Image (cartoon, helix red, strand yellow):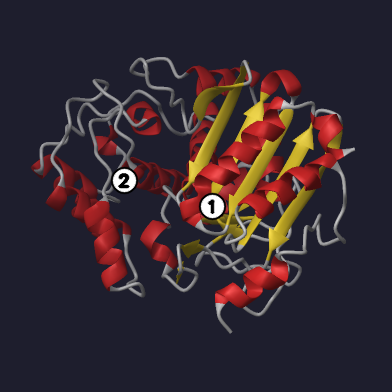
Amino acid sequence: MPRQFFLVLSALFVMACGQQADTTPLHASVQEVQSAHPELPGLAVWVEGGEMAAGAGAAFGHADPDGRVLNAQTPVRIASNTKTYVAAAYLRLWEEGLLPLDEPINGMIDPEFDRLLSADGYRTDLITPRHLLMHNAGMPDHADDTYVAAVFEDTQRQWTRADQVEFLTANHDPIGGPGERFVYSDTGYILLGRMIERVTGEPLSAAVRRLLRFDALGLDQTWWEQAEQAGAEVQPRAHQYLGDMDTTGFNGSLDLYGGGGLIASPRDLARFWRALFRGEVFADAATLNLMIEAPGQVAPERYRLGVFIETIDGATAYSHSGFWGTYAVYIPERDLAIAAVVLDQSEFGAMRALVHELAADDPGSRVD
């Protein structure tokens, strides 16, 4: 059946954690988005912290064309939100003295990658992990429009790290020297992910899960695509769209090796962000300060070590987003974490506006 049929069916549904429609202000806010954007296949949001330490969620729409109802515990590809996890895992290894922040990467990355990058003018003898974490290594993003076109030409291609690093060198020269300017780069996080593997001797998926204490944090709807098997208790991930194009069947290797790769529910995403900022991930509170202060970042860019910094209703907020339509925010002064997904990536703006609305209000008045 066509997607439009299910959009009509979902018009009467606003769900919270799989329960029946509610009339709290949180649900009313989500329903307002649905009313304003009836074409959306689905949206889910989870709010945790403030007066709602246990958290609450709301959603509308369907997770798949068979009519499975979307809820805030339905997993999705979170794409670049993965970078926050990778940065945190790297910093955990830095805490343990196993990885440096300010040494050249040429002795830390695979010789094959070093040859490719050096031959194209990338100063691997000057680029450091800190540069990669802050996207100021002078390294552009392999995942540009040309890469997207290549993905669309063969959506089932199994990409390797080497393919993606080579794609960068074949299509982009360095943009300035290390530390000179901010240039967002998935490729940099691919290198970081591989460094984590090399020093731990574990697959990136296993290292991140162990270092960030997924099990202890109760992140039971989170796993690494292709590298891990979802447990029996895990919901199937939702279908995600680019307009009318269902991208669910695209091979996950297109964004798998550290720039993206994680699948998680909005609930798990918000829960991880709150745990990170409440000191439940790092061994030393100073590590979080390092992550969010990012000494050496090029002004006025607002990227830190794996997180963006922004202002919402006068309050400092830390955030990250993901290409397929995910967004996570944490506001320290309110101890408030919010994560959301919109199933049609082209309507990211509507979902982001909802998150900002919820973040600006008293969370207790929204979810009690």
* Residue at 65% across, 68% down: 63
Q: Position of residue 367 (x, y in %)?
A: 84, 39
Amino acid type of the residue that numbered disc 1 sits on in the rendered structure = Ile
Q: Is residue 342 above or below residue 363?
A: below
Q: Is residue 157 visible?
A: yes
Instruction: Give the quarter of the image for residue 54.
Output: top right
Q: Can you identify the residue that label 2 sits on? A: 187
The crowding category of the residue bearing disc 1, from other C-alpha atoms within 10 Å (few below 14, some 14 to 19, many at least 20), is many
Looking at the image, tell me whether mark 1 or mark 2 is earlier in sequence order: 1
Q: Secondary structure at mark 1?
A: loop
Q: Nearer the viewer, residue 217 or 113?
A: 217
Identify the disc placed on residue 198.
none
Q: Secondary structure at mark 2?
A: helix
Instruction: Give the quarter of the image for residue 158.
Output: bottom left
Is disc 1 in contact with disc 2, using a CB cutoff of under 8 Å? no
Q: Nearer the viewer, residue 237 or 225?
A: 237
Q: Can you identify the residue that label 1 sits on? A: 78
How far is the residue under mark 1 from the one under mark 2?
Answer: 17 Å
* Residue at 90% across, 38% down: 368
Residue extending farthest to the bottom is 1
The crowding category of the residue bearing disc 2, from other C-alpha atoms within 10 Å (few below 14, some 14 to 19, many at least 20), is many
Q: Is 194 situated left or right of 282 in this image?
A: left
Q: Is 207 situated left or right of 30 in this image?
A: left
Q: Position of residue 308 (x, y in %)?
A: 49, 29
- Number of marks in the rendered image: 2
* Residue at 60% across, 17% down: 286
Q: Position of residue 351 (x, y in %)?
A: 59, 45
Instruction: Give the quarter of the image for residue 299.
Output: top left
Residue extending farthest to the right is 368
Q: Is 18 situated left or right of 175 in this image?
A: right
Q: Position of residue 37 (x, y in %)?
A: 60, 54
Quadrant that contains the N terminus: bottom right
